[in-house]
């Protein structure tokens, strides 16, 4: 019912976290927080993923950069080019990204939850490129991705379809 909506008039601006000069992060595309609020990840249009520790859960003012990695690599002309959005599995061992250029889901497996080693796609000791899947038939300008908490469904949205596309995973995560 309408009466159960949150009253937005009680919102108060707190602070921002300037990413300029942080690793190679430019043209900020997306942000993700681990469920406990202790890790923050920022994605740039130049393929970089910055990882931050937050000493205060959910407090961006306490963010300290851990590293900047190229999990997608700078592979011009491949599905790894121009990521737009990303998300993680609930356990932090799988990351999924979507790019508008090639409308492809990119799956990256992490050896440890929420940890990326420095390196380029497929060569980091902490993560490996696990696969790709094209969504271009359903969405030709994909911009955002999410996964269900149980890892059985992935959802894609974009600017060309005016819809949400759902994909069932045969094996969770």
Image (cartoon, rainbow, N blue to C red):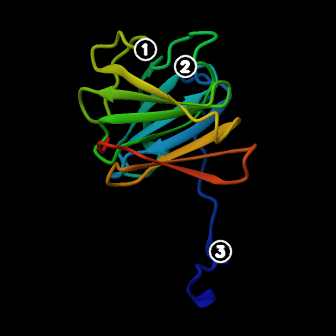
- Residue 154 image offset from top left, x and y in percent: 46, 47
125 above or below 62?
A: above
State yes or no: discs 3 and 1 in contact (Cβ < 8 Å): no
Q: Residue at x 66, y 40 (%)?
A: 139
Q: Residue at x 35, y 50 (%)?
A: 152
State yes or no: discs 2 and 1 in contact (Cβ < 8 Å): yes
User: Relative to residue 166, is residue 119 drawn left or right?
Assistant: left
- Viewer-closest of 121 and 55: 121
Q: How many marks?
A: 3
User: Relative to residue 75, is residue 119 drawn left or right?
Assistant: left
**Residue projecting furthest to the left:** 112
Q: Which residue is mark 1?
A: 121
Distance CA(mark 3)–CA(mark 1) = 41 Å
* Element assignment for label 1: loop
* Element assignment for label 3: helix
Chain-order first, disc 2 or disc 1: 2
Give the mark toward the camera: 3 or 1. 1
Q: Which residue is mark 3?
A: 8
Q: Residue at x 53, y 19 (%)?
A: 23
- Residue 73 image offset from top left, x and y in percent: 50, 13
Q: Which residue is mark 2?
A: 80
Badge 1: residue crowd in 10 Å (few <14, some 14–19, many ≥20): some
User: Relative to residue 139, is residue 160 drawn left or right?
Assistant: right
Which quadrant is the C terminus positioned in?
Answer: top left
- Residue 161 image offset from top left, x and y in percent: 72, 47
- Viewer-closest of 126 and 142: 142
Which quadrant is the N terminus positioned in?
Answer: bottom right
Chain-order first, disc 2 or disc 3: 3
* Element assignment for label 2: loop
- Viewer-closest of 87 and 153: 153
Label of residue 61 in the image: none
- Residue 97 image offset from top left, x and y in percent: 50, 33
């Amino acid at each position: 019912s309408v009466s159960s909506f949150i009253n937005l008039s009680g919102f108060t601006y707190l602070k921002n976290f300037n990413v300029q000069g942080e690793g190679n992060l430019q043209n900020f595309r997306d942000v993700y927080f681990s469920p406990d609020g202790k890790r923050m990840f920022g994605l740039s249009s130049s393929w970089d993923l910055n990882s931050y520790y937050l000493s205060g859960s959910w407090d961006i003012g306490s963010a300290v950069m851990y590293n900047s990695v190229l999990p997608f690599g700078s592979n011009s002309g491949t599905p790894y080019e121009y990521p737009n959005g990303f998300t993680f599995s609930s356990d932090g061992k799988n990351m999924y990204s979507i790019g508008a250029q090639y409308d492809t889901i990119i799956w990256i497996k992490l050896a440890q939850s929420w940890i990326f080693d420095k390196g380029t796609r497929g060569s980091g000791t902490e993560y490996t490129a696990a696969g790709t899947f094209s969504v271009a038939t359903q969405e030709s300008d994909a911009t955002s991705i999410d996964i269900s908490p149980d890892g059985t469904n992935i959802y894609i949205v974009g600017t060309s379809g005016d819809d949400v596309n759902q994909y069932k995973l045969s094996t969770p995560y």
